[in-house]
């Protein structure tokens, strides 16, 4: 009888979940591999970072900042961060795999057609505007950091040199000298402080010139000579540039940041507006989704609702109740889940910033809880999205950190009790606190009281205790800004290297 040989472990299997493929690139502190999620078959890119090198290089704070930044800027034209994992010696960032490669490789073959260049520029400006609205400034925009997916859509990557408004000094400016020589703005070269938004706009202008011309507007073999050209704004547009495009580029590459064109002005420019469509998207299960996805959606307020008749509202409510009646059973909590509710056992803070989370216990049916959440959303004109036992509420007002977004998920505790977990997924903490205290908490407390009164003959002293603790101060103070993405976590990019002909990214501690 043949001896049974032990099964050899796959050496390319990472933490039992990802099968590592070919090397996509490498730098001083990390290397990036293509990988496959063995459970879903999804292709991803995994950045593998050497912990020892990061610690020696003093880059821990940079990694943390980049994770924090990417939590703010989930957008269809920005590379997504899915998960962060770690062992004793390595940190792994699981990110979106963008199949089309760098935009640089496309433009290196020659200048692009005007409509193609315009599409890429529109997508770039949309992503940059989204970042700036959330107080994030990239500071290293160039074709090497712009990727293309299989559908030809642009994705901004590499936020390693990016900064947030919190880093601005008392004079209202940034002072760190960084960027890539050919794309850096003249005020950065002057080293007297600069506006992060204006610097990004300059770099977008250089990118647009490169896409349309096939070469750099400021170029010289001698770097110092090139810096002088940038500082003086010495460039010429080729003859095939239209007058509209030339005027736009002169606004983008204005050496005076005070008079340089702004993002709103760019988006109102005639050349830019041709064929431009604002991107509509939302975040579901911590993934950026388009409205083409077949998820139930309705608006909790707004002009459309104001124009809706009473009969239509009643039909909508009936349809909503019919949908709720067929809801699947909520996921059950096991002992480990319940233990993890304790702050002492919550390890998410090792990889993410702490935020806002609350839980409450109810004997109300799942459909009734969801209906109550929809009522609250309608009162404050929030958008509601539902999927199984999860509800997402999104405000319409844009804050520095984006619109207030709250996720509620219902879990089964016992056959007669459920736990509702509420988390802030985005937006300002102060706004979240106001919403919870004035709208969400009172509504859910009332629901608990209603259920408690209607089923009092079934209640036990344990149920009473649970109800009294619902949404208590201690529950509201279980902080964990745990966007599930960051439990699965966003991927940072530690080093900012640009391995290309037009110079490497420069980073200098201010």
Image (cartoon, rainbow, N blue to C red):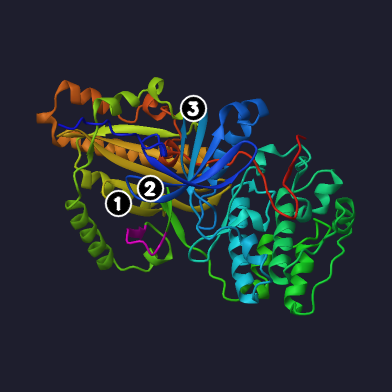
Q: What quarter of the picture does the C terminus occupy? A: top right
**Image point 35% across, 60% down: which residue?**
298
The residue carrying pointer 2 sits among few (fewer than 14), some (14 to 19) or many (20 or more) residues within 10 Å by Cα, namely few
Q: Are marks 1 and 2 in contact (CB under 8 Å)?
A: yes
Ranked by sequence position, the earlier of labels 1 and 2 is: 2
**Image point 23% across, 39% down: which residue?**
331
Examine the rendered structure and indicate whether residue 498 appears above or below residue 10. Answer: below
Q: What quarter of the picture does the N terminus occupy? A: top left
Q: Nearer the viewer, mark 1 or mark 2?
A: 2
Q: Farthest residue in the front direction?
A: 1
Q: Position of residue 392 (x, y in %)?
A: 37, 48
Look at mark 2 in the image and give the residue it sits on: 285
Q: Are marks 3 and 1 in contact (CB under 8 Å)?
A: no
Q: Which numbered circle lies on residue 387?
A: 1
Considering depth in this image, is 38 or 23 the residue closer to the camera?
23
Q: Position of residue 122 (x, y in %)?
A: 61, 66
Q: Secondary structure at mark 3?
A: helix
How far is mark 1 from mark 2, CA to CA? 10 Å
Look at mark 3 in the image and give the residue it sits on: 350
Examine the rendered structure and indicate whether residue 232 appears above or below residue 224. Answer: below
Q: Which residues are magenta?
A: 290-299
């Amino acid at each position: 009888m043949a001896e049974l040989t032990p099964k050899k472990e796959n050496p390319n299997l990472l933490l039992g979940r990802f099968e590592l493929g070919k090397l996509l690139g490498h730098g001083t502190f990390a290397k990036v591999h293509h990988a496959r999620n063995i459970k879903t078959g999804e292709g991803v890119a995994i950045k593998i970072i050497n912990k020892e090198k990061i610690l020696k290089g003093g880059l821990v704070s940079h990694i943390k900042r980049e994770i924090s930044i990417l939590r703010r800027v989930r957008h269809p034209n920005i590379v997504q961060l899915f998960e962060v994992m770690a062992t004793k010696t390595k940190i792994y960032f699981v990110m979106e795999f963008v199949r089309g490669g760098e935009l640089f490789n496309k433009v290196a073959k020659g200048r692009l057609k005007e409509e193609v260049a315009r599409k890429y520029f529109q997508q770039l400006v949309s992503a940059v505007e989204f970042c700036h609205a959330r107080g994030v400034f990239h500071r290293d925009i160039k074709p090497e950091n712009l990727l293309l997916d299989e559908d030809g859509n642009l994705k901004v990557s590499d936020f390693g040199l990016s900064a947030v408004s919190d880093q601005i000094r008392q004079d209202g400016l940034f002072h760190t000298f960084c960027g890539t020589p050919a794309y850096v703005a003249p005020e950065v070269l002057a080293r007297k402080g600069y506006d992060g938004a204006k610097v990004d706009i300059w770099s977008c202008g250089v990118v647009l010139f490169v896409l349309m011309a096939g070469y750099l507007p400021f170029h010289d073999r001698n770097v110092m000579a090139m810096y002088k050209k940038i500082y003086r704004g010495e460039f010429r547009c080729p003859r095939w540039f239209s007058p509209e495009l030339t005027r736009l580029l002169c606004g983008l590459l204005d050496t005076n940041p005070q008079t340089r064109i702004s993002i709103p002005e760019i988006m109102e420019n005639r050349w830019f507006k041709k064929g431009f469509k604002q991107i509509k998207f939302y975040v579901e299960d911590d993934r950026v989704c388009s409205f083409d996805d077949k998820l139930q959606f309705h608006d909790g307020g707004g002009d459309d609702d104001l124009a809706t008749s009473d009969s239509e509202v009643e039909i909508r409510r009936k349809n909503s109740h019919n949908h709720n009646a067929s809801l699947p059973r909520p996921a059950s909590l096991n002992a480990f889940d319940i233990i993890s509710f304790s702050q002492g056992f919550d390890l998410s803070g090792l990889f993410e910033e702490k935020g806002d989370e609350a839980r409450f216990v109810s004997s109300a049916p799942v459909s009734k809880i969801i209906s109550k959440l929809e009522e609250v959303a309608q009162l404050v004109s929030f958008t509601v999205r539902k999927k199984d036992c999860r509800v997402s509420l999104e405000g319409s007002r844009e804050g520095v950190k984006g619109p207030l977004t709250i996720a509620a998920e219902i879990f089964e505790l016992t056959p007669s009790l459920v736990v509702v977990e509420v988390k802030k997924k985005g937006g300002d903490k102060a706004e979240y606190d106001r919403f919870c205290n004035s709208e969400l908490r009172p509504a859910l407390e009332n629901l608990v009281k209603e259920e408690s009164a209607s089923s009092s003959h079934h209640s036990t002293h344990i149920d009473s205790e649970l109800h009294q603790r619902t949404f208590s101060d201690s529950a509201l103070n279980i902080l964990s800004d745990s966007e599930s993405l960051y439990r699965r976590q966003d991927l940072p990019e530690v080093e900012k290297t640009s391995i290309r002909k037009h110079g490497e990214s420069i980073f200098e501690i201010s």
